Amino acid sequence: MIKEEVKVFKDPEALAQGFTEFLLKLSDVYPQMNLALSGGTTPKVIFDYWAEYCKETIDWKRINFFWGDERCVPPENVMNNYGMTKDHLFDKVPGINSNNIYRIHGENEPEEEAQWYSKVLLGKLMQKLDLPSFEMVMLGLGDDGHTVSIFPNQIELWDSKDICVIGEHPESGMQRVSLSGRVVNNSQYVVFLATGKNKAEKVRDIIKNKKDFFNKYPAAKVNPKKGYLYWFLDEEAASLL
């Protein structure tokens, strides 16, 4: 049975505070935390919160930063997840050591980068079931039900035997390097972060009717069998639950 918990907060700022408290509790358990970050609007709010309020309260040297996915564009491109994190967090917190940052190089050839990042994860993370295992993966939820960079029209990538796969945005065609679903589900804690009314329908579908959407939305396939699944939602994203 999946160990799943839903936490609802008044607004994105309250969510950022609640998620930070959750992270601090987990950091009491893990001497070193390997954290896979997400892109998107909700993580941006969290990174801004950390930069403003958590320069001293989070022990940054005990966190290694990775990414669940990256768009195949260079860091200076506004679409790049690492570039967004750098602007909103890394450049503002002196305590974050650049040696603890393991980015996906969106400017490189996608297939080669996917193979290279797979080797990084194998070398840096503990392994469980012959796969890398993160202490925590932060996930976003796309309006179409995608998560990391596995989209509904490529849902078969979820079960790929590869550690990293190449997803392609169904409209723009932009390629992205992404963790496979097997790696996401091999994590100890998986946390969906969703805010806004536009997420409410998919949040309801996946939390309330997961079986009906299991083969339709990649996000419905998130099921850390040996770990824990949390949803951090604001009131708008949770409004249809």
Image (cartoon, rainbow, N blue to C red):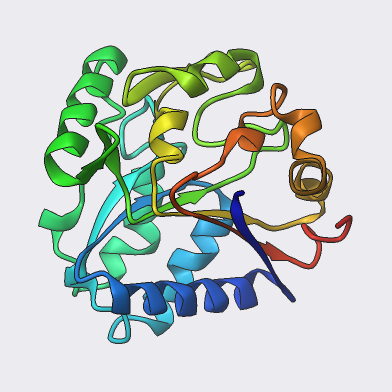
Residue 234 horizontal/vertical position (percent): 72, 66
Quarter occupied by residue 107: top left
Residue placed most toward the observer, 77 or 122: 122
**Does residue 184 lie above or below 100 as drawn?**
above
- Identify the image quadrant of the C terminus: bottom right
Residue placed most toward the observer, 190 or 110: 190
The residue lying at 20 percent from left, 65 percent from top is: 32
**Outermost residue to the front:** 1
Quarter occupied by residue 94: bottom left
**Does residue 20 lie above or below 176 as drawn?**
below
Q: Is residue 176 left or right of residue 97?
A: right
Residue 173 horizontal/vertical position (percent): 54, 13
The residue lying at 47 percent from left, 30 percent from top is: 181
The residue lying at 81 percent from left, 47 percent from top is: 208
Residue 211 horizontal/vertical position (percent): 76, 33
Q: Is residue 43 left or right of residue 2?
A: left
The residue lying at 81 percent from left, 62 percent from top is: 236
Quarter occupied by residue 35: bottom left
Q: Is residue 103 left or right of residue 207?
A: left
